[in-house]
Image (tube, rainbow, N blue to C red):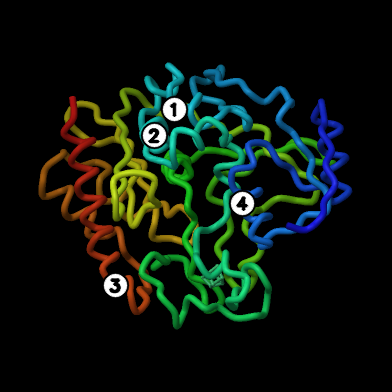
Amino acid sequence: MYPFSYTKVSNTREAVNAGRNGGRYIAGGTTLVDLMRETVEHPETLVDISDLPLREVRVTERGGLRIGALVSMAETAVHSKVRTLFPVISQALELSASAQLRNMATIGGNIMQRTRCTYFRDVSAACNKREPGSGCAALQGVNRTHAILGTSDDCVATHPSDVAVAFAALEAQVHLLGPDGERHVPFADFLLRPGSTPQREQALRRGELITAVEIPALPRPLKSGYLKVRDRQSYEFALTSAAVALHVRGGVIRNAYVAAGGVGTVPWKLPAVEEALVGERPSDRLWAEAAGRAAGGARPLQHNRFKVELLQRTVERQLRTVGDSK
Ligand code: SF4
């Protein structure tokens, strides 16, 4: 591990000042400390934000849900309003990591976590994300777990978060505070596809701090849920996953919110699937037809061609599970 300095801040103004001067925010530290130990990351200054007052979950005036950036994954998963209003969020969190990690890791940190690409974590391997311009060992290497959507010639790594898939499906906004004040960024614009700059992963400006994630008020009743497919049933990242929320009234699907994980360089919203669902009556045929659109534009690699069919089947199964539930 490289030497670094450490400072703890007690309010958001101090935090933003420290961030503007190049400090790196840390709260639960469940990703960053690992990466520092492996010398993948070497920040000069850590700014501990764990005392900031960003630990509230509340229903907004409009009926949405605001989750403070420092609420832990575990607290969020069991919160009564999260469970009642958006079970897809609770389920995604409960299928993530271990109980110990969920107790430490925060919502803000979860969406900021870095890829699990093994070459990224191996400092002897070529990796454009870790060292821009060095190449991408995954392209010709073992790429079974890598992305099939949103990839570039420079990077094919997946985003590892489960709850980010739920946030993408539900069209959340990320609340930021920076030197120029507050701003709200749609989740779809917050996490960046790799393009030719895979080292740049979020639309954050210098010094900006995530303060909350807000889910908009969506039409009710809303049924939702999360399905994760992985090599083993615990403490494993998704090969594919699907976050689904449906507003059904009078026997017709009026609104659909669908996204996939484990397949994209960012959580992958599926507008073609949503369009196929809206205005239709739930049926087995509809689930299959809509899910058939899930892998549009996929560019599979040598070892992950199986993800195309697996993604379609994952989405179909979760549409059926949510759509047929009472
Ligand atoms: Fe690095 Fe991305 Fe290639 Fe993995 S896929 S080695 S993170 S550039």
Q: In what quadrant of the picture does the C terminus appear? A: top left
- Label 3 CB, ligand 1: below 8 Å? no
Measure the alpha-carbon separation of dots 3 and 1: 33 Å
Q: Is residue 63 above or below residue 178?
A: above
Between disc 4 and disc 2, the foreground one is 4
Q: Is 255 on the left-hand or right-hand side of 159?
A: left
Give the numbered dot on residue 77. Answer: 1
Residue with the mark numbered 4? 34
Earlier residue among tags 1 and 4: 4
- Disc 1 residue crowd, few under 14, some 14–19, many 20+, Cα 10 Å: many
Between disc 1 and disc 4, the foreground one is 4
Earlier residue among tags 2 and 3: 2
> Mark 4 falls on what kind of element?
helix
Measure the alpha-carbon separation of dots 1 and 4: 24 Å
Are dots 1 and 2 in contact, CB under 8 Å?
Answer: yes
Q: Residue at x 34, y 57 (%)?
A: 239
Between disc 2 and disc 3, the foreground one is 2
| Residue type beneath disc 2 | Glu
Residue with the mark numbered 2? 94
Earlier residue among tags 3 and 4: 4
Residue with the mark numbered 3? 305
Measure the alpha-carbon separation of dots 4 and 2: 22 Å
- Disc 4 residue crowd, few under 14, some 14–19, many 20+, Cα 10 Å: some
- Label 4 CB, ligand 1: below 8 Å? no
